[in-house]
Amino acid sequence: MRLRSSLFACCGLLGLLFGMAVFLRGFFPTPLKSFGSAKAKVSEIPGEPVLGLASNWTKLPSPLFGKVVIMLVDALREDFVFGPKGRQFMRYTRRMIEQGSSLSFIAKAWPPTVTMPRIKAMMTGRIPGFIDVIMNLNSPTLLEDNLIWQAKTAGRRIMFYGDDTWIRLFPDHFVEYDGTTSFFVSDYTEVDDNVTRHLDSVLKRNDWDLLILHYLGLDHIGHLAGPDSHLVGPKLSEMDNVIQKIHTELLSKQGEVTLPSLLMLCGDHGMSDTGSHGGSSSHEVNTPLVLLSPAFRKKDSFTASEYVEQTDLTSTLALGFGLPIPRNSLGHLILSVLEEKSLREQLRYLHLNGYQLSKLVQESIPTYEKDPGYKLFGIAQKSHGSWIKLYLEGNTSETLANLGKKVLRQYLDALKLMSSSLSKIVAQYDMYSMIVGTIIVVEVIFLLIVSTPDALGSTAEFEVPLSATFYSLLFYLLCLMFTAIHIIVCTSTKTSCYFCDVSWLLAATAIVLISALQCVLTSTLWKHFTNGKPQHKTCAVANSSWSELDLLLLLGTFGHTLSLGSSSFIEEEHQTWYFLINTLLLVLFQDVCRKYFAPSDLQGKSKQNKNPEDIDGNEQQTTICGLLETSDCDQKDDKSKAYTCSGESYEKWLALLSPWVILVFCRVLRSLNQTGIKWAHEPDFGHWLTSSSHRAELSIVAAGSLLLIFILVQRTCSTVSKAALALGLVGIYCYRAAIGNVTFPWNPDKHISKGIIEARFVYVFILGILFTGVKDLLKSAFVFPDTTTNSRGLWEMYNGLVLLTALLLRPHNLPVLLFILVVQFILTKFIWRVLDYDAAQITIIYYWFGQASFYFQGNSNSIATVDISAGFVGFENYVELPAVFLTLFSTYVGPLLWAVHLTCYMSSERNRYSAAVGHSCYCLVLLRAIPASVYVILVTSLRYHLFVWSVFSPKLLYEGMHTLVTTAACVMFTAMDQKRMITVLKN
């Protein structure tokens, strides 16, 4: 079957995407089988260990607290309470910490630091899997043992107000609740007022035992404006007032109850310096934990807070409530909570926690007898029995006290060791699904590589042995073999396997795909070995020698791919792309200098090496003018020739200056957003602009950027689209002013709103421009098949995407969009007209600039830099599909705009040879497929690396999403290529 290069590449990328999806499902681990739905029971509680005598303590200890209020403030950073902001804005809380009956800790959250996994960690005591980042958008019911289920089973009455994630996780567990959506980040006022409005009535009632409050406003402010916003201080003061109201009301009723109350202030995760979360930086994982209760002794000063694990809350709250510790909890008791209890009671609580962890170790670790924590717990249990015997005998000597302290230390050490051992084996990989996905990915990338000589041939069209594959005996033998392997694996495995649980239709599809790819790959290799030469002359062989640019593009692409095996290079990947872009610009400058100043014989030799099909009249004219530059123009008497030389001289100096202008832009943008890990905390120009004291400067930058964007984009717009573009850009500024990012000079104190009307106003113009582009494309496809209408439609589509980008990007990032447009203008108007680069070289250069733009925007390989606020622009409520699309678009807007511009450029301005579009599409797919495929293999070999969850796993998600975005661009490329060939055939 004869296929175009673009269509073949697009099909290959779809196969790669399918393989990566299967691999991702297997890579992100599922819980161990011991982490099922089984629950801890009161009847299984062990008695107090004793040697020789019978203990009278065989039941759960009585509760430590009566009424408990858990106040969870989303994205509450540790320094928001214990740092300068806490002293300034949370005065009552700080006074209680320093002088009241309280305990304060810094609770460390495990990545991923997003809400749903953190709630699961605090309620189950288990470390959630990384795949919970995806599940965070649609939280399923939590079936495994948890604190809420235990409390309800024990007859505790639970009330909840706040983030509706709790309601989805724990349906039918609350006697009263009122949920608020956690995804509408533009609202940071009503979302908290809807929680606080219930407090006056609830605190006066006695029909509840556990009250949970989840405040979202601070998290929404972080997503909108960052941790340094002027909105953070008032929000912290608001939370402090809520704490004071609850604490005062609980204390006022203390005389009416037998047990002391407890108010717990905590955060589910922190907030990065950009206002987001999801990563593993200190500001994201460190959260405050403040316990206020008359059960604690009063403090006389503030001391440095002790570090605890967030999972330690589960066992502490369970025993404090008089409940069994959830079966799968990995946490250990916070001993400070028992500071007023007797030594016997403290040992009893620690023994219960150790017994629960030892049972979990037995179920999870095959060689549990050798586990140091398990062995130490056995020793501590025996020592505890000896201590109990002495205690029951009435021994009051110093020996009893010393033995008790020794047992206490042994228990604490055993708990920490067992918790650490369980944390390391908390989940297992689905190796079968990973292997299936890897096989598909490897077959696709090898097929793309071996087909490259034919795909980049002069016609961008070649024969693919598809028909022969499905009639070959090898294909059916492979299908039978892989089916047998699938049946054997699925019937013999003892662990859960996703690929064994899917329908037979999907499994058969994967088996057929693997077999077909293997047959096509074998046929292609056989054809190359037997024929010895590709079917058509390729562009690559048009030039007999490798230029400096070719070597740079080749070494840079493969060097970056190999660097993905290093965690440090992944964390600081932006540095790699900045270096490659700077080096590329120097090579471009060298080529421009060679073009104008090299001897004529070298230029003529270079022209002879070019493919004649690639040279049109304009290129020949440029070559003649370049040769004329070497002569003395002042000696020419002909006025027209003098005028031509003057114009070409002007063009020459613009071309020479262009790489340096782009270099300056790159250096400025590197200072706009610090990204990565090592220097992310360093101050940058973006933080300076977004601070509340520099809104005037941000307004000037935003207004100037929008004006320049209009000047650059309107060149390719129709008259109607120009008007829509202008009104849309004005609407964008009005939207940002409405939500308080920028100001109007004549009304600096404008009331802040959600900006819903302004954003929808802009959406109307975006849809109008996109509709105009689609209309022109359909017109050129079915009515008047000409390239002019097709080109106009493509540029209209591009301009609509630019307007959407300007709406979604934060104001301080508008210079990034301006940079993209300026560089694209410089490349097309001054550099490509001078340098005779082929489609493959231009595609690689565009890809590199797209990658650099991704990091200029402030993105990184950490989930914390994903700006989810873009998904809610113009929406009053959370709507899943638009939110996901807008967030994905805003994250990958750099690579996407460069890919779409490449499509427009190749389809409209580069008419040198008909195969250019197909070559560009094929090269773009290779550039995306090579690093993605290699990274799948690398991350498989590094799955037990120390940084697999903090570094390699987020990067794997980014690779998958980037492949998905590239697939969308590749589909557009393929459509344009097919349309172009149809037009050529008709003409």
Image (cartoon, grey):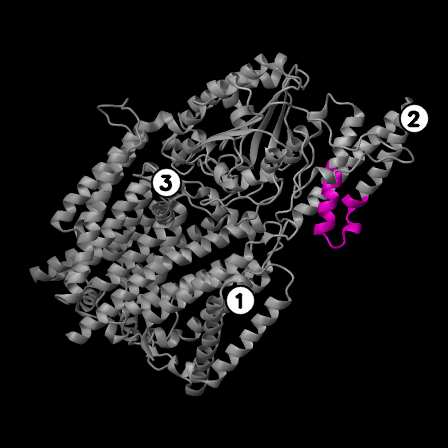
- Residue type, numbered disc 3: Tyr
Q: State which region is magenta.
A: 353-375
Task: Give the percent coordinates (x, y) of residue 901.
Answer: 28, 56
Seen in the image, is 836 located left or right of residue 335?
A: left
Mark 3 against mark 1, which lies toward the viewer?
Answer: 3
Viewport quadrant of the C terminus: bottom left
In the rendered view, tell whether residue 418 sits above or below residue 431: above
Quadrant for residue 758, please give it. Answer: top left
User: Is 910 in the magenta?
Assistant: no
- Residue type, numbered disc 1: Val
Viewport quadrant of the N terminus: bottom left
Q: Give the Cα distance between marks 3 and 1.
A: 36 Å
SS of the residue under disc 2: loop
SS of the residue under disc 3: loop
In the rendered view, tell whether residue 178 sits above or below residue 719: above
Seen in the image, is 238 located left or right of residue 256?
A: left
Mark 2 against mark 1, which lies toward the viewer?
Answer: 2
The answer to whether residue 599 is seen in the rendering is: no
> Looking at the image, is mark 2 or mark 3 earlier in the sequence?
2
Residue at numbered disc 3: 878
Seen in the image, is 588 located left or right of residue 289?
A: left
Question: Is 267 in front, or is 214?
Answer: 214
> Looking at the image, is mark 3 or mark 1 earlier in the sequence?
1
